[in-house]
Amino acid sequence: MLAPALLAPTLALFLLGSACALAAWAARGARRVPRSGPRQHTGQVVQALRGALAGRVSPGALRHAARDAESEHFWNAMEAITATLRRGERLALAASLECNRHVVAERRVLAGNDSPLCRERAARRLGLLPTLRMRRGLRHALVAGPEPVRLAAGRALAVLRDLAALEWLCAHPEAVASRTLPALSGLLRAFGPGARARLIGALDRGVAVPHVECAILDALGVSRCRSARERIEARLRSEAVDVRVGAARALGRLGMGESIPALMLALSDPAWPVRAQSAQSLGRLRATPAVDAMAERVADAAWWVRHHAAYALAAMGSEGRDALCELAVRSPDPRAREMAREALARAGARAA
């Protein structure tokens, strides 16, 4: 039992600890309330949006629900639902909400002098609900930049199939030159099938920035735009190595046997990345006329060329595997023998 002299300090410490624990519990509870609120309000807006699309909620009720929501809740709901909508549904929803106070506020941010981060967010948000009325502001942002704002505005205009915006991007490749190749290719493809003729026209006129030219080649290849084959093949003779690599990759994606002779010539390119990509594309095309030329590349000085050539041969069926077997046994180059055996082993494991 504690002595009377120690009882009072011990009791004081106990009460102080209890008070601190109670304050911490209250603070955690206060923090939990705001976190649960947004989920509830965002869910209500999403339900209203889904109901409007299904015809269960009137346009007037939808506008009231969107108007009464907080800005963050409204845009969270937009992000949640627009990802599931077809283009026509998104445009119809945008037409119903283009006068909403949150949309109007973002249009003002985009057109104003706010920070680039705020303007990029505004362009991205408006891209969720693009309308013809917003096209002017988005075009202005596309030209004014900076680059992150320009890319977000470009995506929004792509949803509207604004081919004039695409023409501007092709004519000013330096405006988006620092974006990654997948980002640029995705942006160009987002303009839809009508963009292909514009992209071919850009190749005919010439693209001043090789990186953007590669994105155009990639977009045409992924879109399987067969009418662009001759223009793409011509890029195998470009002075820029990246463009030659991009052309070889795009030809493989087109899936046209007519490109086999051009890719076979590219197997002798002085730059190893071009040889490697050409070998990979020939494998993708199952180009059995190129078996002998590919077998020579298995002895290439560059590891990636040997790798892609051997694995491409393994994908060409019995003719390609027969060539690998011959290399694995009879090649005077130990690197070619090793790579041929590796490709055969991997092909056998996949078959098993």
Image (spheres, rainbow, N blue to C red):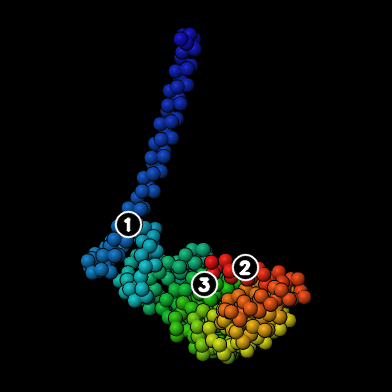
Q: What residue appears at the point 35 percent right and 53 percent down from the top-left corner?
A: 39
The kind of residue tagged 3 is: Leu
Dividing the picture into quadrants, the one containing residue 321 is bottom right
Q: What residue appears at the point 60 percent right and 84 percent down from the top-left corner?
A: 288
The kind of residue tagged 2 is: Ala
Dividing the picture into quadrants, the one containing residue 159 is bottom left
* Residue position marked by numbered label 3 in the rendering: 151
Q: What residue appears at the point 65 percent right and 68 percent down from the top-left corner?
A: 342
Which residue is more in the foreground, 221 or 90?
221
Q: What element carries label 3?
A: helix
Q: Earlier in the sequence, mark 2 or mark 3?
A: 3
| Left or right of 54, for residue 82 | right
Q: Which of marks 1 and 3 is nearer the N terminus?
A: 1
Q: Earlier in the sequence, mark 1 or mark 2?
A: 1
The kind of residue tagged 1 is: Gly
| Left or right of 239, for residue 128 | left
Report if the CB atoms under discs 2 and 3 are less than 8 Å apart. no
Q: Is mark 1 on a helix, strand or loop?
A: helix
User: Percent from the top left, x then y, of residue 31?
Assistant: 41, 43
Report if the CB atoms under discs 1 and 2 are less than 8 Å apart. no
User: Percent from the top left, x then y, of residue 303?
Assistant: 71, 71
Q: Which mark is residue 43?
A: 1
